[in-house]
Amino acid sequence: MHAPVADLHVYVLILDQTHALDLSGPVQVLGAVRELGIAEVALSYVGVSPDANLYQGLSVNALAALPERVPPGAKVLVPGAKWAEGVYRDPDSRRAQAWLRDAAGCEGVEIIAVCSGAFLLAEAGLLDGRRCTTHHTLLGELDRRYPHTRVQADRLFVRDGPITTSAGVSSGIDTTLDVVRRAFGEAAAAMVAQDLAMYIRRTAMDPQHSDLLDRHNHLNPAVHRVQNLLLERPEAKWRMDALASEVNLSPRQLTRLFKRHTGISVKAYHTLVRLERARVLLCHSELSVERIAEAVGFAYPQNFRREWRRQYRQTPTQWRTAAKSRE
């Protein structure tokens, strides 16, 4: 029996000192596409030599040789390596850069770098004149070393033509989910995000530091439970007594604990969650602003517009226009 023809072919470039999560996160996303029966994804793990040692100490063996030509429409994934002053300037990296330049010239090929992988692309000259990003601690270094690039701060990922760069570690998952969305549709990306227990799928327009995620940085299980309820059903008209009963607290106790551990009120957090869901709908749907306001639980569109402007300093329509222009 012949193997099914792949709907998407992805070449994963693995070099010495590659970060394990930069590699495994995107690969897990692509594997889920296949496991969920959405599409057939072929993953080819390639390198300049058959073996590579990841930064975390894991050895990867039996890597395929760099192909002479990448087929039309394929993706090339470049996970980042541990940052060091001389990173990507060794002979193996130079060979990888030459291959990436050739791959970039193939029809319909997209190259996707995670975290410090942007530096490998920059060394290859692939970011000259392009908008790009990397881990927030390395943005200044990328800009200093490669003045012909157009470094974008506070972005999860940036797609400029056939080249995509992303911020640190977990943003590689968001970037790959966007690949899935563009290849197989919004519903497919949502299915994969749900399978990976990602309750919020971030977009290219989202900042690297998420206020919403930062407010999960505590260890109180009751507050986490309430946060998850709000995330799961942001459109619901949650009453404080109903939320409190879910965690066996009085409304007064919940109010006090929530503010102590998150820094804001339950109501303010609920608004953040609704705006986060609206952000995804603005970017990835054609729903009107009025329908989006209703879908995320605002009683009136004007209330939604007011909260959006307060948070993002522009109207929802202005934000949507900017997001679409960067697609």
Image (spheres, rainbow, N blue to C red):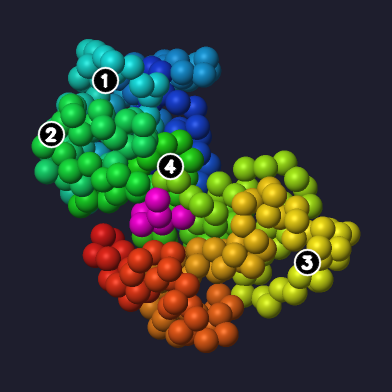
Q: CA distance from mark 4 to mark 3?
A: 34 Å
Left or right of 307 in this view: 263: right
Q: Is residue 160 magenta?
A: no
Return the residue at label 3: 243
Question: For numbered disc 3, what is the local secondary structure?
Answer: helix
Q: CA distance from mark 4 to mark 2?
A: 24 Å
User: Residue 104's x, y, as percent?
Assistant: 19, 40
Q: Amino acid at mark 1?
A: Tyr
Return the residue at label 2: 147
Question: For numbered disc 1, what is the local secondary structure?
Answer: loop
Q: Is residue 3 above or below residue 228?
A: above
Left or right of 259 in this view: 6: left
Q: Is residue 69 above or below residue 308?
A: above
**Residue 64 visible in the snapshot:** no
User: Residue 206's x, y, as percent?
Assistant: 40, 55
Q: Residues within 10 Å of mark 3 (few under 14, many from 20)?
A: many
Return the residue at label 4: 172
Q: Residue at x 20, y 19 (%)?
A: 94
Q: Is residue 39 above or below residue 313?
A: above
Q: What is the magenta segment's predominant secondary structure?
A: loop
Q: Residues within 10 Å of mark 1 (few under 14, many from 20)?
A: many
